Image: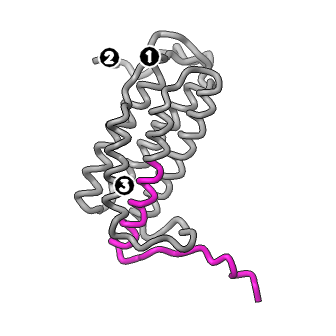
């Protein structure tokens, strides 16, 4: 376990730099900090979903995901560290398949919404997609294990399916995009 903070402010970042997990100091707007910072943001957005009244099976999955996102943030914060593995991605795929099995097939795009828990889940999904894009950007400059990118990709898919499940469970249902609304 790492060091525990007894004092929250250190003033070491006042110059616009921050320390990585290996002790290296980098600019706070570096691709690495941006990537793991957005993973943290996605984790916080999932926390908002968890603050809602949601089914226990979804709650269990999302709590597990939060732990894995914390692990992923550590992986991105410590160059060369491995915390997300193929088994983690396989687990997401199995959960995705399980929740998707009872949903009707998609015929149209779905607008984000469907009640508060579903809307928050859609927001978490879009933040997760941004974390994925920023991790890909990081991979153009530094080594990033493919599992990190695959995990974020699969997680955003899972969050989309969970948003659909939550919209239906809440009774709000889904609103599909009406591409013909401007005609006529």
Q: Is residue 164 magenta?
A: yes
- Looking at the rendered image, the quarter that the N terminus falls into is top left
Please tell me in which quadrant of the rendered image residue 140 appears: top right
Q: Could you tell me if the residues under marks 3 and 1 are in contact, i.e. CB atoms within 8 Å?
A: no
Measuring 56% from the left and 25% from the top, which residue is drawn there? 32
- Tag 3, which secondary structure? helix
- Which residue is denoted by mark 3 in the rendering? 96
| Disc 2: CA contacts within 10 A as few (<14), some (14-19) or many (>=20) | few
Location of residue 159 with respect to 5 vertically, above or below: below
Please tell me in which quadrant of the rendered image residue 138 appears: top right
Of callouts 3 and 2, which one flags the residue occurring earlier in the amino acid sequence?
A: 2
Q: Could you tell me if the residues under marks 2 and 1 are in contact, i.e. CB atoms within 8 Å?
A: yes
Of callouts 2 and 1, which one flags the residue occurring earlier in the amino acid sequence?
A: 2
Looking at the rendered image, the disc whose residue lies closer to the viewer, 3 or 1, is 3
Residue furthest to the top in view is 23
- Which residue is denoted by mark 2 in the rendering? 2
Q: Is residue 163 magenta?
A: yes
**What percent of the width, then of the height, locates residue 123?**
50, 55
Measuring 63% from the left and 78% from the top, which residue is drawn there? 178
Measuring 55% from the left and 26% from the top, which residue is drawn there? 33
**What percent of the width, then of the height, locates residue 108?**
56, 73
Query: Quick check: 140 left or right of 150?
Result: right
Of callouts 3 and 1, which one flags the residue occurring earlier in the amino acid sequence?
A: 1
- Tag 2, which secondary structure? loop
Q: How far is the residue under mark 3 from the one under mark 1?
A: 32 Å
- Looking at the rendered image, the quarter that the C terminus falls into is bottom right
- Which residue is denoted by mark 1 in the rendering? 21
Q: Which residues are magenta?
A: 155-184
Residue furthest to the bottom in view is 184
């Amino acid at each position: 376990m790492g060091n525990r903070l007894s004092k929250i402010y250190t003033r070491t970042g006042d110059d616009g730099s921050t320390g990585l997990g290996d002790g290296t100091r980098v600019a706070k707007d570096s691709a690495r900090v941006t990537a793991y910072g957005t993973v943290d943001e996605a984790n916080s957005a999932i926390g908002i979903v968890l603050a809602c009244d949601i089914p226990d099976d979804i709650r269990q999955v999302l709590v597990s995901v939060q732990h894995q996102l914390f692990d992923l943030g550590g992986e991105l914060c410590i160059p060369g560290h491995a915390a997300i593995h193929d088994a983690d991605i396989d687990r997401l795929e199995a959960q995705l398949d399980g929740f998707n099995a009872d949903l009707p097939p998609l015929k149209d795009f779905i607008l984000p919404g469907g009640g508060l828990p579903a809307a928050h889940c859609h927001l978490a999904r879009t933040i997760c997609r941004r974390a994925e894009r920023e991790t890909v950007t990081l991979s153009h400059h530094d080594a990033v294990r493919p599992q990190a990118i695959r995990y974020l990709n699969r997680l955003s898919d899972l969050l989309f399916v969970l948003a659909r499940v939550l919209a239906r469970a809440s009774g709000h249902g889904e609103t599909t995009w009406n591409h013909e609304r401007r005609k006529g």
